[in-house]
Amino acid sequence: MHFEITDGAIDAETHLVEASGELDLSSADELERRLRRAAESGKRFLIVDLARASFIDSATIGVLVSANKQLRPLSGAIALVCTDRLTTRILEITGIDRAFAVCASRAEALESLRSRRFTRSDPGSRQPQPHAGD
């Protein structure tokens, strides 16, 4: 079974992981390592590009859910890029599409994460309030 995983920083808080080929039990450990390493290096926002994935299984979904749990205390998030109808259907059936932004492009995923950074639910995004008399 063939798979390839590449990754790199987008900015100070955002990291891209691109996975292609068959993503199953044999690739899950590598995907998990890449996602964990990004989070441990201070990246709160991850884009996982699955556009070139030909197959994903429950091990891959488990890795994504685990990474999401790791980012949650940091007010982080994961956005998935998925263009394949079958892969999108798997994400829908498993409910992953309700836990992650599932986007048609990297640009859309990045925009989704950027808008999330500045929502009121993100404690790190709150601006200091002026003091009375300022």
Image: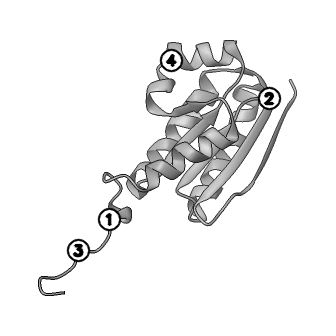
Residue at (50% x, 35% y) in the render = 65
- Contact? badges 2 and 3 (CB < 8 Å): no
Q: In this view, does 25 lie to the left or right of 113?
A: right
Residue with the mark numbered 3 = 129
Circle on res. 94 = 4
Residue at (58% x, 28% y) in the render = 61
Q: How far apart are marks 3 and 1 (CA)?
A: 9 Å
Q: Distance between the residues labelled 1 and 2?
A: 37 Å
Q: Which one is in front in this view, the residue at disc 2 or the one at disc 3?
A: 3
Q: Report the residue that reaches farthest toward the front.
A: 133
Q: Report the residue that reaches farthest toward the left.
A: 132
Circle on res. 63 = none
Circle on res. 52 = 2
The quarter holding residue 103 reads top right
Q: Name the kind of residue labelled 2 in the image.
A: Arg
Q: Which one is in front in this view, the residue at disc 1 or the one at disc 4?
A: 1
Name which of mark 4 and mark 2 comes first in the sequence. Answer: 2
- Secondary structure beneath dot 4 equals helix
- Secondary structure beneath dot 1 equals loop
Name which of mark 4 and mark 3 comes first in the sequence. Answer: 4
Q: Distance between the residues labelled 1 and 4?
A: 34 Å
- Contact? badges 1 and 2 (CB < 8 Å): no
Q: Name the kind of residue labelled 4 in the image.
A: Thr
Q: Which one is in front in this view, the residue at disc 4 or the one at disc 2?
A: 2
Q: In the rendering, at what x and y percent does residue 24 appear?
A: 71, 25
